[in-house]
Image (spheres, rainbow, N blue to C red):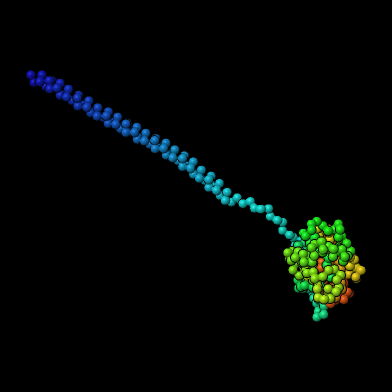
Amino acid sequence: MLSSSNAGNNALYGTAGGNKDDRGRRIVVIVIAAVVVIALVISGVLVWRSSNSKASQAKAQSQASSAIANNSKKKSTAKKPKKSATAKPKKSASDTASQVLDKQVMDAIVNTYNTGSGHAAVSVMSGNVDSYASSTASNSMNAAGLYLPPWLAYYDLVGGSPAGGYGPALSAMDNGTANELIDSDGGMDALNSWLDSHGYSETRFGHLYGDVSASENGYQNTTSSKDAANLLTQLIAKGEDDLLNYDIASDGVSVPDGATVHAHRGMGVGNAYDYYMVVSDGSKKIVVVVLTEGQTKEQAASLTSVVLQQVWQKMFISGK
């Protein structure tokens, strides 16, 4: 009896024990499955984060590269020099030397002729450059032999060149023709107005050419060496300076070897000897004006000779 009862109990206990084991196995399986799911989830998260991180890095790199490129472009633009207007070539020292005279040397020459009883004024021009002007260059002085104003005024007051009908006024310093030219300009008032309007403030006509009586009565024709030099420069621009044909060598003026000098000479009025000259070597032209008052013919010729020598040596020979 006892044996049978134990068998039943064992059978009963045996069934109960089996259910307990199954539950344990299920729990283990569930735990393992949960662990696997969690692992998969974590792995997925890690993969997503890694992928997202790589994409972010790629985007950041792309943005950085773009920023660098833009910054580089800005720097390149900033460093790029602006286009400037074509620079004018600077004049060399030799060009400058060929346009100016030594003022101290020239002043020493001219001042020798400025004494209590006599006066001298000298102007030298190269194009529109004042190559030399004595301290007296702007002084109003007696204008003897100055035939340039009515000739040049004709261009504005009448029109065209007066060379056709009035050529002798320059080529021969003919007083009659020069006076006819003044009439064509509208008379002396019109001529003096033209001089004023063109800035020739020291040049005035008080009498016709050759009118000694008017001159003796105080009606003077005046100019300055500066005004006369500018008038000669204007004549060169018109291409008519070769009409000046006075032979200054006949007065004892020394013309440098190789130089061509187209000139006018005036004398007599106010004891004046005046020279209006264009000096050339065949390619370059320099204007030289020498005005004197109270000087002898020999003194005026001597001063003019020394000035021409300085011009030729410094502005033609040394300046080449």
Near-viewer residue (1 or 43)? 43
Residue 144 shows in the view: yes
The residue sitting at 61% across, 51% down in the picture is: 82
- Which quadrant holds the N terminus? top left
In the rendered image, which quarter contains the C terminus?
bottom right
Residue 240 in the image: state x and y as whole percent: 83, 59
Q: Decide which of 264, 7 is in the foreground and name it.
A: 264
Q: Depth check: 219 or 85 in front?
A: 219
Q: Quadrant of residue 225?
A: bottom right
Relative to 13, is 187 above or below? below
Apparent side of residue 181 relative to residue 61 in the rendered image (left or right): right
For the question of whether residue 272 can be seen, the reply is: no
Q: Quadrant of residue 308?
A: bottom right
Give the quadrant of residue 315. bottom right
Residue 141 image offset from top left, x and y in percent: 79, 73
Taking the spot 17% from the left edge, 22% from the top edge, the residue there is 15
